Amino acid sequence: MITAISNVSPSITSEIHQNSGVFFFHRQVSRTPQVVLGSAVTAVLAARRSKVLQVARRAGWAQQPRLPRIRTDPEESETNFGRNIFLSTAFLLSSGANKVLLRILLVNVHKYAFMLGVLTNLLYITVFGLQFRYELKTAGEQDDESQADSLKFALNGRGLRLLAGAGACEAAAFVGLPLCASQLPGSLLPVMSQGLLIFSMLFSWWILGKRYDLLQVRKMNMMLDPRDVLSSNLSRMSESQRDLTTLLEDANNRKTVDKADTKIHGNIYTYWAFHDVLLQHKLIRAEGSSNKVLQVGIVFVMIVQILGPPAILIWSVYAINWTNARVGLGSWEYIPGSYERGVSNFACQVLGTFFLFIFILNGIYVIRDDKQKSEKIWYVVKVFQKSSHGTVKRFWLRAGAMINSWCVVISAICMAPCFMLSKSPKDIIFDAFALLFLFRLDDVNGDLGFLEEQWDSDLFGTFYNDIRSQEEEQRRLENAEDGCHDGSSIASDDECGDAWHCSVYTVARQILMILLVCVPLFYVFVEGAEPRHILDRRDDLHNKIQEMSDAIEYLKHELKISKEAKSCGQLFNRGGTIMA
């Protein structure tokens, strides 16, 4: 009878996980009553086929607790919204704490886990039995009738037999589960526990007439063995990772193969250096009006690169009043709602600091790329020097290295005072891109691009790679004949073609490395430097106010004199009248 009543309460299943001789019990609300109920009805199926479904459905509905209905007023529900949220949160927290504390307790008292499980079940029976009895006494007429019907069905006839059989099966399972679990591997227990879902779904569909959609079936399959899902996901991830690795290796191999087709982008200085060679081999047009205009444009570009950065630096330095300049963070001061110290000023400081670092770092990479490109060009120069296919003007190659390094370094220096003169984030961005424009002004693939028809980057790249590969192959053959296989005599792509030329790029790179640290720090920690045009406007405004004040005083003086003259005239007229 006790086991039968225990089925009215929520059933508790204890799973024993065997790990290093320690049993961990996992409480889980199971669906064992439906499974046992289906098993009991199956035994009667052959004898009383016609009444089985009806009895089973009645038994299934009897398993559901019939609690008194609570009807609440919508207005009352709205007024108790805060209390409902508090109670729901307390319920969730207490439920989670219960599970955590139970597992901590079972680790320390694992020797008495079985006894505690039995005691827990008895406490459930006692508590729910008292609750059921209390509800019978306090229920109304309608609730009393419904509970009386449920109790009558559970304690008489078929309901009693079904309920008693279900309780007996659950009691047997409760006792046999620890015994069987101790003899089975721990990894098999979760799989067997989740296997109960299959029987629950089958008997619910067959006996109770419940229908499941495809989504519920798929979720059940995922819950049966989550390790299979995890392993399949890991396998797919490993396959995708292998595919990605293969793609990266193929891309690297293609990059190595395609490296022989690397272009050599020239500039106006390499164009002037190879001008005679290009004319001799008819790679550019002969002298003409269009070519003369091109030469004039190239001269102007060179002048802009030489004079542009220092002109900006001189103007920006003299446009700032350095009298009150000092070390501090006053320029970063933020005053909400202020026009001069508001969000725009703070954004200017942040963008300026980031752009300084990015700009100088980009300059370092520009110098590195120019050096690598120049090394290849100097290698081609040596090839032409050994042959009689034309003369290369080395002066323009050295001038190009000097002018490019000059442009990058001076632009990096003048950027900080230019940012100090900026009034808005828009000015910061425009100034940064304007200075960046000077870097690529002389390149063939730059923004002007009027040298694209005069310098064939693909041709020079292919020519360099061909002569380089031929020379390396010839040196390999010579080393093979001499018995030398270490390849030490083979030239490297990183060797410098001209000592002075490489030293210019090296010095420029070292200066930029120093500026990468000094210029952002200077911009951040210098305060009190104000633009002169703002001070000039203040002086002009002060002078205008002074002039207006002087004019007002003069008008007051004239008005006073006119009043005195008018009063004197009136006295004279009165005197004349008296005399008359």
Image (tube, rainbow, N blue to C red):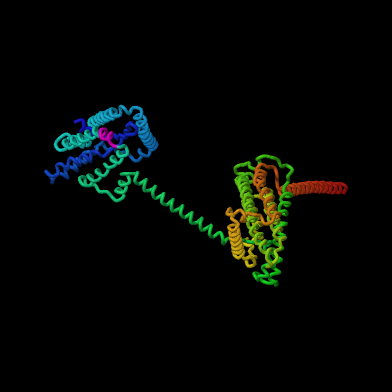
Please indicate whether residue 114 sits to the left or right of residue 342 in the image. left
The residue nearer to you, when weighing 8 against 565, is 8
Residue 190 at x, y percent in the picture: 31, 39
Q: Is residue 553 magenta?
A: no
Which residue lies at the image location 62% right of the left edge and 66% below the top edge? 456
The residue nearer to you, when weighing 369 against 381, is 381
* Residue 343 in view, yes or no: yes
Residue 173, compared with residue 508, is above or below; it is above
Q: Quadrant of residue 468?
A: bottom right
Residue 450 at x, y percent in the picture: 64, 65
Residue 107 at x, y percent in the picture: 35, 30
Which residue lies at the image location 26% right of the left edge and 39% below the top edge? 31
Which residue lies at the image location 28% right of the left edge and 39% below the top edge? 193
Please indicate whether residue 258 sits to the left or right of residue 377 in the image. left
Residue 254 at x, y percent in the picture: 51, 58
Residue 112, compared with residue 210, is above or below; it is above
The residue nearer to you, when weighing 440 against 482, is 482
Q: Which residues are magenta?
A: 177-184
* Residue 430 in view, yes or no: no
Q: Is residue 179 magenta?
A: yes
Residue 129, compared with residue 523, is above or below; it is above
Q: Residue furthest left?
A: 47
Q: Residue furthest right?
A: 579
Quarter of the rendering occupied by the N terminus: top left
Q: Quadrant of residue 370?
A: bottom right
Which secondary structure class fits the magenta region best?
Answer: helix
Q: How many numbered tags mark residues here?
A: 0
Please indicate whether residue 251 sits to the left or right of residue 71 in the image. right
